[in-house]
Image (cartoon, grey):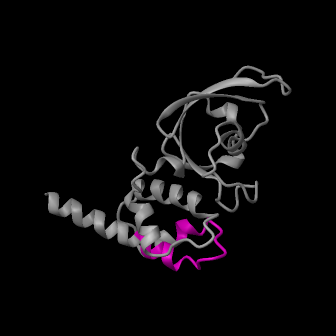
Amino acid sequence: MPFLNKNTRHSITLFLDGRKVTGLAEPRLLLSDFLRQEQFINAVHVACEHGVCGACTVLLDGKAVRSCLIFAVQVAGRRIDTAAGLADENGELNDLQRAFRRHHALQCGYCTPGILMSVTDFLARNPQPTEGALREMLSGHLCRCTGYTGIVRAVLDVVAKRVSSRSSCT
C-alpha cells in the first residue's frame, strides 16, 4: 500500500453486505468507525476498542475479524459482511437469527451482532461442533446479560436442523 497522508480522507470502495459501496476514510480511521459513521451500519457495535469483547466482529472475506483492530483503508476492494446482511433481501431472518429469537439468546442485544458473525464463520468451518468447542469459540465474546445458555442452545439447535436437512437430502 502506498504511503497515505494521515490528514487526507481517501476514497475506498469495498463490498459491504453484498453491495459495492464507496466512502471516505482517513488512514487512521478504524473499520468499525467507517462502517458506523460513513456507511451507517448500526449492526457493528463498538465497546472495548481493543479487540477483546467481540462486539465489533464482522466477516472479512468470509473470516471473523474484530473491526476495531483494522483500518478501513486496509479493506479496500474486499468483502465485508455484517449482521445487517444476514437477513435476506425481504428482511426474512436467517436460521441462526431465528434460533436466537426462539431461544432468547439475547437480552440487551449489544453483543449479539458480533456473536452472530463469529458463529456464522465458526459453523462454516465446523458444521457439527461439540458444545465444548462452541463454548470455547464463544469465550472470545463478552455478554453480560445471557450467561450464554440461550446462545449455546440456539446454535446447537441450528446445527441439529442443518444436519437433519442435509441427511434428508441424501
| Residue 20 at x, y percent in the picture | 52, 29
Q: Residue furthest right?
A: 7
The segment highlighted magenta reads: 136-155
Look at the picture and state if 113 lies above or below 81.
below
Total numbered badges shown on the rendered structure: 0
Q: The C terminus appears in which quarter of the rendering? A: bottom left
Residue for point 43% across, 76% down: 153
Q: Residue furthest left?
A: 170
Look at the picture and state if 73 lies above or below 123.
above
Look at the picture and state if 12 lies above or below 88.
above
Q: The N terminus appears in which quarter of the rendering? A: top right
Residue for point 62% across, 45% down: 41
The reply, left or right, for residue 43 in relation to residue 103 is right
Q: Quadrant of residue 27?
A: top right
| Residue 167 at x, y percent in the picture | 18, 63
Queried whether the magenta region covers residue 17, the answer comes back as no
The reply, left or right, for residue 84 in relation to residue 49 is left
The reply, left or right, for residue 57 in relation to residue 32 is left
Relative depth, front residue between 149 and 85: 85
Q: Quadrant of residue 36?
A: top right
Queried whether the magenta region covers residue 143, the answer comes back as yes
The reply, left or right, for residue 4 in relation to residue 19 is right
Residue for point 51% across, 59% down: 116
| Residue 98 at x, y percent in the picture | 41, 64
Look at the picture and state if 69 lies above or below 47.
above
| Residue 73 at x, y percent in the picture | 69, 31
Q: Residue furthest front?
A: 90
